Amino acid sequence: MAITHAVIVGAGMAGLTTALALAARGIRSDIIEQAPHLAEVGAGLQISPNASRILARLGVLADLEAVWTEPERIAISSGKSLRQLAHVPAGRFARERWRAPYGVMHRATLQRGLQAAVDKNPLCRLHLGIRIGADWRQSIASVVGATPDVTIGADGVWSRMREEIANAPEPDFSRNVAWRFTVPTEKAPAFLMPQAVTAYVGPSCHLVCYPLREAGGFNVVAIASGVSPGETWEVHASLEQKRMLLRQFKGWHPQILSLLTGMESGKFWPLYQVSDGRWHNGRDVVLVGDAAHAMMPFAAQGAAMAIEDGWELAARLAMTPVLADALSTYESVRRARIARVRNRGAFNRFAYHVRGPLRLGRDMVLALRPPQALAADLDWLYGYDAGL
């Protein structure tokens, strides 16, 4: 075993999952979070089988299953006609084919579940309201009372710990914005399907909708081009920004336009990604989650990749006697996986937003692919199991 004690900077999904994964290997950790409490940031979240099987191993999944929704299908539909173009079966099919469930929930539900597991685990200590200073090593030592074997940066796209790594990834605004809001069930239009995750696709933008059982309604995410407000997660949409969104969905089905027009308390999230770069300093600092590889949401794998990171980093640290070797192996394995997921996301982005004659070709190809064939295309993604 390379280490016995880790400090994790950041108590989001990546940080909390990493702490639990380390504890499962007998490694204690201190999680340091600058927020005074873990706020309910964001809205809906998709947890695919590659992530849910890890949550099951960490003892978190059962509580999530009690409140989440397992959609019967993952569908692609036309934003202009609402006609379904293709679908991948989920629900029982996902459990049988990929040996783990596919579920959707509020982001806060997963956050609470992970935090509850951390709070109960004697090998995990969570420190809230602590900001790491310029002398970060001294800051950490003063909080935890010791110098850790390794410090894990799980502090997101604006990572402070990334500054300690030469040639680390750098954040870049994608020139796309995600507009997020929820629609109560009693106000939901008929085209929103209660047992499906549906991507409505159209020229240069798309809309993702799925039920949120805990919220008593539907999660709606509209992704289109936009202007960044700076280093922030979410911003309340102004009237002019809302008008800008509606202009980009011009020509879409009237029911979708009505849904967007009636958006209440909408927020927009500037979508940042990070460039390629090193994920560790070769000695005692390593990155996980968005700090290492923030990506566009076109493959709906941001949370899943953070969960995979935590599990695989913990395994490498437990299995490898030399810390530097553990960090190098982790980066090598995860970098290849992330690259493939990013490529899938880039393909989805092209397919979702394609214009003109190519759009007609896309629709014809999708219509000819049976659901089982589309599911087979996802085996490498949803069936992934590090087996560590």
Image: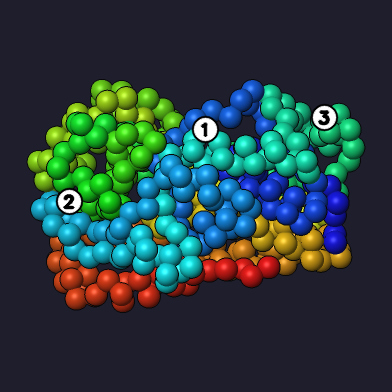
Identify which amino acid the numbered label 1 is placed on. Answer: Glu
Identify which amino acid the numbered label 2 is placed on. Answer: Gly
Is residue 353 in view? no
* Structural crowding at the residue carrying mark 2, measured as other residues with C-alpha within 10 Å and reported as few (<14), some (14–19) or many (≥20): many
* Structural crowding at the residue carrying mark 3, measured as other residues with C-alpha within 10 Å and reported as few (<14), some (14–19) or many (≥20): some
Examine the image and state in which quarter residue 251 appears: top left
Left or right: where does residue 5 sit relative to residue 59?
right
Whether residues under marks 1 and 3 lie with C-beta atoms below 8 angstroms apart, the answer is no
Left or right: where does residue 323 sit relative to residue 221?
right
372 in relation to 109, above or below: below
Left or right: where does residue 110 sit relative to residue 10?
left
Circle nearer the viewer, 1 or 3? 3
Q: Tell which circle, 2 or 1, labels the residue nearer the N-terminal end.
A: 2
Instruction: Please identify the quadrant where the C terminus is shown.
Output: bottom right
Residue wearing tag 2:
79
Q: Percent from the top left, x then y, of residue 261?
A: 18, 31
Q: Tell which circle, 1 or 3, labels the residue nearer the N-terminal end.
A: 3
| Residue 231: mark in rendering | 1
Circle nearer the viewer, 2 or 1? 2
- Label 1 element class: loop
Is residue 369 in view? yes
Q: Tell which circle, 3 or 2, labels the residue nearer the N-terminal end.
A: 2
Q: Nearer the viewer, residue 239 or 144?
A: 144
